[in-house]
Image (tube, helix red, strand yellow):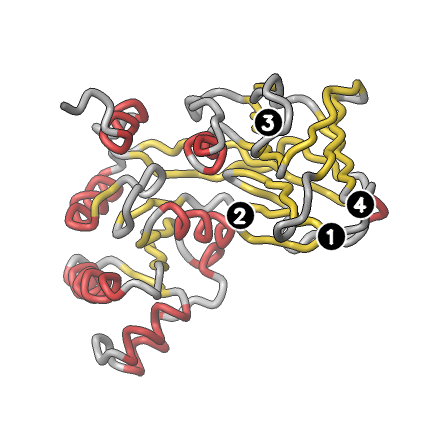
Amino acid sequence: MIYGITGNTQKEQLWEPVAKLLSWLEQQGLQAKLHPTVAEGLALRKLLPQAQAAACTAHDLATEVDVILSFGGDGTLLQSAHLAGRHGTPVLGINIGRMGFLADVEVEHVREAICAIERGDYTVEARMALEAELENSLSLELPWALNEFVIDRTGPAGLITIDVTVDGVPLNQYWADGLIFSTPTGSTAYSLSAGGPIVSPGCEVIILTPIAPHTLTLRPIVLPASVTLEVRVYTSGQPYVLAADGRSQLITQEGQRITIRRATHTVNLIKLPGQHYFQTLRNKLMWGAR
């Protein structure tokens, strides 16, 4: 297999493990390709000769490799998922971050993980994503999300009004700071911190979690993934934010229809033997700790 390597280049703890991994992959007769920013960083730190870094660089990582190794935390893995895009290239998260719900292979075990992949001793989890489109075919900078879409107010202005219909039937008018539209994968991210439920990634649902709602009866709701949501936001003339997996876009026209539904593609995550979702929950959330 050809392994593509990307990572959080803002973390100094990225460079030495990647440099050592490249040397080990070469010894094993395995090929690696590097994201341009990783190749540049290794060359800059003299951990890889300039010529070798240039030779390993992949400008379209998803189409040139069999597996993407994402070094960082969950935020880095989300970026890697968007690199993989609709190509379906499987991603393995190598954790050098703090939480690591998605990046659940610790960096010291990366060689063992690659050996397992080479043996075929792994599974691929197809995680559902969401896609969004604006009325009048206006383009979104990031039209799909693995974790969530978030509608949020800008600055310290007052609450915003968010009208939501489900398959054409009115659901609710939210008066809140914002509203999160989450996948099961994203249920342990922003939605969780806003009071949303934890949902096993094998479930096919969309979770709506209000952010600081004015009415206490506005609770999170879980909908089947087959529904189509239509959303209109009213802000008394102020712009608002539509964010996809943490990347924000300013929307200046209120009342514009936003359609959110299940994406036509999935994001493929590699899982190794002994990796279980509930074990990850127990470890990361310290359930049962005394």
Residue annotated with mark 4: 236
Give the residue displayed 59% in from the left and 27% down from the top: 208
Q: Which is more foreground, mark 2 or mark 4? A: 4
At label 4, which amino acid type do we have? Ser
Q: CA distance from mark 4 to mark 3?
A: 23 Å
Task: Report which residue position mark 1 lands on.
Answer: 239
Front position among marks 1 and 3: 1
Q: Nearer the viewer, residue 28 or 211?
A: 211
Left or right placement of residue 47 versus residue 158 in this view: left
Tag 4 near tag 3, CB within 8 Å: no
User: Where residue 61 sits: x, y (%)?
Assistant: 45, 59
> Which numbered mark, 3 or 2, is in the foreground of this view?
3
Residue 161: x, y in percent?
74, 35
Of badges 2 and 1, the one in the foreground is 1
Q: Secondary structure at mark 4?
A: loop
Query: Which of 255/47 is in front?
Result: 255
Q: Earlier in the sequence, mark 2 or mark 1?
A: 2
Between disc 4 and disc 3, whose residue precedes? 3
Q: Amino acid at mark 2?
A: His
Left-right relation of 171 to 128: right
- Is residue 226 at least partly visible in the picture? yes
Gap in angstroms between the C-alphas marked 2 and 4: 41 Å
Q: Where does residue 125 sit, x and y in percent of width and height?
A: 41, 31
